[in-house]
Image (cartoon, rainbow, N blue to C red):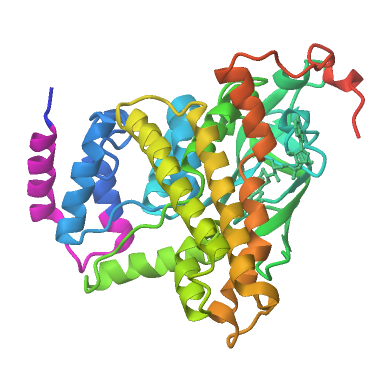
Amino acid sequence: MVSIDQSRAEVAAWLATHWDPDADLIEWRTLLAKSGWGCPSWPTKWFGRGLPPSHNAAVQAEFERVGAVGMAAGVSMYLVAPTLLTHGSDEVNAKHLLPILTGEHTWCQLFSEPGSGSDLAGLTTRADRDGDEWIVTGQKVWNSGARGADYGILLARTDWDAPKHRGISYFAFPIDQEGVEVRPLHQMNRHASFNEVFMTEARVRHDQMIGAAGDGWRVATTTLAHERSAVGTRRPRFATDGGPLVEAARAESAAYFATYSWYPQRAGRSNLIVPEAQRLNRDSDPLVRQNIAEINSLARIFGWTNQRARDARAAGKEPGPEGSLAKISMSETARACHAAHSEIQGAAAMLTGPDTAAKGMIAEVLVSTPAQSIAGGTDEIQRNILGERVLGLPKEPDDTRSLPYRDVARN
Ligand SMILES: Cc1cc2nc3c(=O)[nH]c(=O)nc-3n(C[C@H](O)[C@H](O)[C@H](O)COP(=O)(O)OP(=O)(O)OC[C@H]3O[C@@H](n4cnc5c(N)ncnc54)[C@H](O)[C@@H]3O)c2cc1C
């Protein structure tokens, strides 16, 4: 068994020989992927070294020590790659994992539909077999980052005679094709990170199915468990004066994360509360102080809960219902911040523009925090999961679960 110290020494030696700040970004990431040091806990067959997840932090620290760039970040890495590693065929993984790691291909999630968000298994986008291909027709909605994405992880109904959860298949779906139209949706916070995706007789090859036909719901639950526990994409950190390769990675990251520039506001911007209370001389107001104390207490408690979830992941456990707790805790914090900002600013919280409170950020917080308790499954759905899977309460009644889906009444 390799120790963490051995891994640290090995990656340090590898970086000392191979890290070249003047190299091309894609060439560097390809070399890194093939070495296994970019994702050390992935299997050796797929660009990893098969090390326990508990080694990741030590390896990452070596990258930061020398200022070396790691693998691409984003939805592709935190949702798509773990799903492929669990369910993808050799063919699918050989085609997609390397461009995900290098950042050459970006992905989006094509799950929600106008009539199927919480009730995701009620989706009606259809895929019909045509030789080696499937023909896809339907509409998806709220698809973050779909504009500009190369692929989508797509759920479509392939068997209307099977019950609701058993007639769904999961595809690696190419976006850039005739028959696919991506339309941005404008949000009340003036950003446009979501899209509607219309598919009209679009095509996807049969060998791009992930998991078996009709088994897409099981594959989707893997993706959703990772989504809840990661909740949001983590931004990479870069060395301040790292040379051309670091600058190329920084520019790539800035372009990708521009879509998510309002996510800190969505989380509540707790860091603005005390400075704004001080600026407006509200920091001695007992109600304001009480709100601040509540937010700090929540942050501590949720920090411990999240640490427990991170430790479980580092010990190699798959994400479980603790992801629902993490998701709810972020919603609670965002709501408490929303209340505290409103209390401190009063009506001025509604003003936007550069010469208003925190340059308009407070108003942006107020119209962005509702998204926190919707994205990745609403708070109510997370509570249902905790009730059923942790507390062992009876499942929500649904007398249509075993009927052929074509016979189920839909809106
Ligand atoms: C920031 C953000 C990013 C997103 N990104 C993506 C993406 O990239 N890809 C994608 O596919 N989707 C994405 N979504 C969509 C998201 O997954 C859905 O909005 C969410 O699952 C809720 O579905 P819905 O909007 O259809 O609401 P509905 O399902 O219509 O829910 C309406 C209300 O009814 C409640 N409700 C519904 N069913 C139950 C129940 N059984 N028990 C109790 N209460 C219930 C809900 O909690 C909610 O309050 C994103 C959403 C947001 C806000």
Quarter of the rendering containing residue 44: top left
Quarter of the rendering containing residue 408: top right
Residue 135, given in percent of the width and then of the height, sits at: 75, 36
The magenta segment: 4-28
Residue 189 drawn in magenta: no
User: As drawn, is 201 to the left or to the right of 362?
Assistant: right
Q: Which residue is drawn at 77% across and 21% down?
A: 164
User: As drawn, is 305 to the left or to the right of 327?
Assistant: left
Residue 65 visible in the current orientation: yes
Residue 265 visible in the current orientation: no
Q: Which of 302 and 19 is in front in this view?
A: 302
Residue 70, given in percent of the width and then of the height, sits at: 29, 53
Q: Quadrant of the N terminus?
A: top left
Residue 25 drawn in magenta: yes
User: As drawn, is 88 to the left or to the right of 153?
Assistant: left
Residue 385, given in percent of the width and then of the height, sits at: 62, 26
Quarter of the rendering containing residue 265: bottom right
Dominant secondary structure of the magenta stretch?
helix
Residue 259, given in percent of the width and then of the height, sits at: 56, 63
Q: Nearer the viewer, residue 81 or 366?
A: 366
